[in-house]
């Protein structure tokens, strides 16, 4: 199986919304064998869930989604190749006065070194990274 897409947090979490965009859901379904996510995306979802009150129904829903769906797709690590690319890109962007968020750099690096298209709604967070392929399933 050849992976094609790396899902950013906003795309991966869309099915959790009460009014989830059907276009995103359709793309997730059509690409079910071509998608992966990144370990930092899982981190963002877990920390977001645990910032909710323990009694919150939403917390349980997010954690269940992580166990029942996210755990079934490849979760790619932030490895040495990603760290190397990220370090070079981060330094380049800092020198240009465009310091990116660290976790966005990790996600971009994982997509880039694995030759995957980053699927995100937040193009602005990733637009300055060199050679990164992106798609927005929300439009």
Image: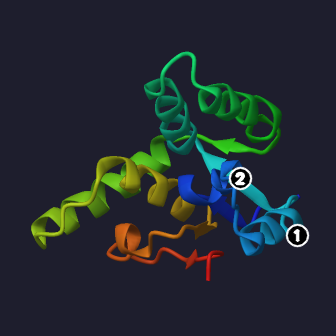
Against 89, residue 63 (above or below) is above
Image point (62%, 60%), residue name: 11
Against 103, residue 2 (above or below) is below
| Residue identified by numbered label 2 | 36
Lateral position of residue 15 relative to residue 34, left or right: left
Q: Position of residue 55 (x, y in %)?
A: 57, 17
Could you tell me if the residues under marks 1 and 2 are in contact, i.e. CB atoms within 8 Å? no
Q: Nearer the viewer, mark 1 or mark 2?
A: 1
Q: Nearer the viewer, residue 77 or 41?
A: 41
Determine whether the residue tagged by mark 2 lies in a helix, strand or loop.
Answer: strand
Q: Quadrant of residue 2?
A: bottom right
Image point (54%, 38%), residue name: 45
Separation of residues labelled 1 and 2 (CA atoms):
13 Å
Image point (69%, 61%), residue name: 19
Q: Nearer the viewer, residue 107 or 139?
A: 139
Lateral position of residue 96 relative to residue 129, left or right: left
Q: Position of residue 29 (x, y in %)?
A: 87, 63
How many numbered dots are placed on residues in this image?
2
Q: Position of residue 64 (x, y in %)?
A: 74, 29
Image point (39%, 57%), residue name: 85
Determine whether the residue tagged by mark 1 lies in a helix, strand or loop.
Answer: helix
Q: Which mark is residue 30?
A: 1
């Amino acid at each position: 199986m050849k992976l094609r897409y790396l899902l950013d947090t906003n795309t991966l979490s869309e099915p959790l919304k009460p009014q989830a965009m059907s276009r995103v859901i359709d793309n997730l379904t059509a690409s079910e064998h071509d998608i992966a996510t990144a370990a930092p995306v899982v981190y963002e979802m877990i920390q977001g869930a645990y910032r909710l009150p323990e009694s919150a129904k939403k917390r349980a829903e997010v954690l269940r989604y992580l166990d029942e769906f996210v755990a079934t797709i490849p979760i790619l690590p932030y490895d040495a190749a990603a760290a190397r690319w990220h370090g070079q890109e981060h330094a380049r962007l800092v020198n240009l006065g465009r310091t990116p968020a660290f976790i966005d750099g990790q996600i971009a690096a994982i997509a880039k070194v694995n030759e995957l298209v980053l699927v995100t709604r937040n193009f602005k967070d990733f637009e300055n990274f060199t050679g990164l392929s992106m798609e927005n399933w929300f439009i």
